[in-house]
Amino acid sequence: MATAVALAPALAACPSAQSAAAAAPASSIAADPSAATGPSGAAPLIIEEITPQAVGTRSTVRVTGRITNTTERPLSEVTVRFRYSTMPFTSRSDLAAYAEGDGGEPRTFGPTITLEEDLAPGASAEYELKVPAEDLGLGGFGVYPLTVDAVDGAGSRVGVQHTFLPYAAQSRDVDPLRIAWVWPLMDQPQRIDDDTFVDDGLAEDVATDGRLSRLLWAGVQTGDVRQAGRPDEPDAEPSAAPTPSDDAVPITWAVDPALLDDVERLTAEGGYQVLPDPDTAGSDVSADALVDREASTDAQAWLTQARTVLGNEDAHLIATPYADADLPALLAADLGKDAEAALTLGDETIERALGRTADPDYAWPAAGVMNDPTRDLLAEHGATNFLLSDAAMPAQAHVTHTPTGAAPLALPDDENGTALLTDSRLTRALDTDSWAPGAATLAQQRFVAETALIAAEQPGGDRTLVVTPPRDWDPSPELAQSLLEATDSLAWLDPVALGEVEADSDAADERRGLTFPDRGTGSLVTGGHLDELQAVRRDIRLFNSVLTENDDPFRPAVLRVESAAWRDESQIARARERLATAVEETTALVRVMPGEPVTLASKSGTLGILVANDLPDHSVTVRLSIFSENSERLSVDDERETFEIGPGGKTTVYVPLSARVNGRTVLHMSVHNADGEPISAQETLTPVNVTGMGTTALLISGAAALVLVVALAPRALRKWARRRAEQAGDAPGAETGAASGDSAAAGDDAEPAEYHAATIIVTGRDAARGRMQQNGSGPSGEWQSGPADSTGDATTGRTDAGGPGEPVGADSDQGRTDGDAADGPRT
């Protein structure tokens, strides 16, 4: 006899219902407007539990959940109904259509309940529907549709959920399916260059209640979900080292080495940086501005736990290429070196991070698809077992059941391999939101139904089912734990380790050969993205060309940008731009240091140029390139040998300069590699002022100086004789001698022909003052005032030249001090 129980409705709005997201995919709710979600976003009807998962002949089916009034009017006489069909699904396609709400409604009614009170807007009430399995009239082993809906007194639908009722009667007649789980610890790349993260997503994922922490603990199967609460309800701290239970379902851990690399970087002393959120950053925040973060203690704790679990040699561990690189796209773009690097770097990273190697016999290409060149590359690196989507080797048209997940695969050199084909329908079924109220129950029931129907398709067959959740899987703790428990408890499933799965030669007839879909891996690593990376690759090549040890420090960053895991066009473009900036900034650390302007006061000279290597970890071998902006004025010898600079070091390069013409020019200096290529567009500019004389100018100046000395020597001798005569003024004939001496001096001054040939050009109003400084008039070179009668004529020492720039020495008295005049006083 069917029974139904309804608890009294809550008269106030239920907080949990108000804050919950839709309990099931929108497509599973009927199109009736009364069944739509209300303003609060709460689902009108949810299923919280179905027991048992697989109904036996003596079972009592129990369905519990909650009904919520999401309308703006009270609902009266609300009835919750249990509806099912006595006819099981005959195909997985029908099951999928029903799950999406596209199938017909079951017409058989089971237990129903009517709420005792009206349901106010926002209010909710719990319900429970129970019925013995024997009262349902179900047939043999199979999967039956089950619908739970609610209608009001007027017959309008309030809400609906579609789920499944697996019936396990006569399941002993069914050969169990071998089922192998692959448990992914993966994500899209979180870093761009070595120090910059896209956002804070990875730090959140490795926190106590983060996605990666939950997956790690769920895979260990400790039965303890304290540390795996809802994202907004963190629970108790996990223990440092989870210990798996003895009866745990065997799983294969699948890890992206780049994820371990990224988590390690979160723990580095000194912290790290993240790009600002473009949606929340203010208009005054540059898109290139970086936000500093401290080293993550959560990341260190997660890494310790991962090393305990994954570092155990008993754990089966496989790895993707580094950053889950899109190998088919790279090979098609003639980037085989990148594809090779993704495999070798992945192996090195696993060994460094976990202290062990991943199983080299297993390969999991991006999206589970590969073409022949990808297969050959993976085989060269030791792979013989390939984890692929069933789309990579589709079932033959005549096959009406789900083929086994292990099929033979031909390898190069007539070697035999195994294709481990995952069930894509199961993967999609697991890729649902399991965090909303009731969502985990629906996802769990879908998994049970799918596996039951696969087993029922060919009851006497010997088949293997390979289950791989999505790479970025985010199950609720309840779902992750219940899936593994169901794997262990359901009668039609036999859990096995992936390493125990072998190819069935008979399966070759059921599947087509290796097929690469037209869409490729479906990733964003397309021709356009790779074309955009070409400029960055060129800059990286130039930077690498000066590294002494032939290192390639940007290779991991390039592989991260080439990952097949990117899902957002704007995000991958932002990552690409940031990588270009990082390469430019790093290359700029190898530079010519700026110096002061240079004055060259001779025909030639040597200029010392300081070249710095501010890279902290790499030595460089470079050559200095230098050229003059005006080679006619100043020439430079640009033929120089390469030289090495250690990390953080500097060296001075001495460059000979040759001047031809006086004037100003600019030297352009940059760092080149050994092949003469500039490693960047960065140049250091140094102004040079050439003031030295050329050969001809020096000869003329020398000759003029010689003439001046010859012209002035007699005068100097006469002056010396006159002074001697003045000192002996009391001697007889002194006055006469002085007069005759003065007369002779005046006579000599009247013939300045040679003196005029060595003219000094003086410009401006300081001409006289400059002439006096040369002749030593005044103690500090200032003009000394003479008697009133000595001004305004030749004896005052002024020049007769009236304007600026006129030559000095136009008459016989020019160029002398005042004391040189015949009758003028000495100053």
Image (cartoon, grey):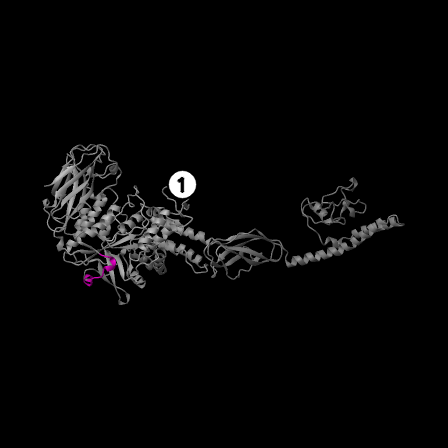
Q: Mark 1: which amino acid? A: Ser
Q: Is residue 202 above or below residue 329?
A: above
Magenta stretch bounds: 496-508
- Of 158 and 220, the residue lying toward us: 220
Location of the N terminus by quadrant is top left
Quarter of the rendering containing residue 317: bottom left
Q: Is residue 506 magenta?
A: yes
Residue 24 appears in the picture as rendered: no
Total labels drawn:
1
Q: Residues within 10 Å of mark 1 (few under 14, many from 20)?
A: few
Could you tell whether 140 is left or right of 662 in the image? left
**Residue 147 shows up from this direction:** yes
Question: Would you identify the image quadrant in which residue 256 lies?
Answer: bottom left
Question: Which residue is disc 1 drawn over?
Answer: 283
Q: Residue at x 69, y 57 (%)?
A: 702
Farthest-out residue, right: 732
Q: 348 left or right of 815?
A: left
Residue 372 falls in which quadrant of the image? bottom left
- Would you say residue 139 sits in the magenta stretch? no
Residue 554 image offset from top left, x and y in percent? 40, 55
Residue 28 image position (x, y, % from top left): 20, 44
* Relative height, residue 114 to residue 396 (above, below): above
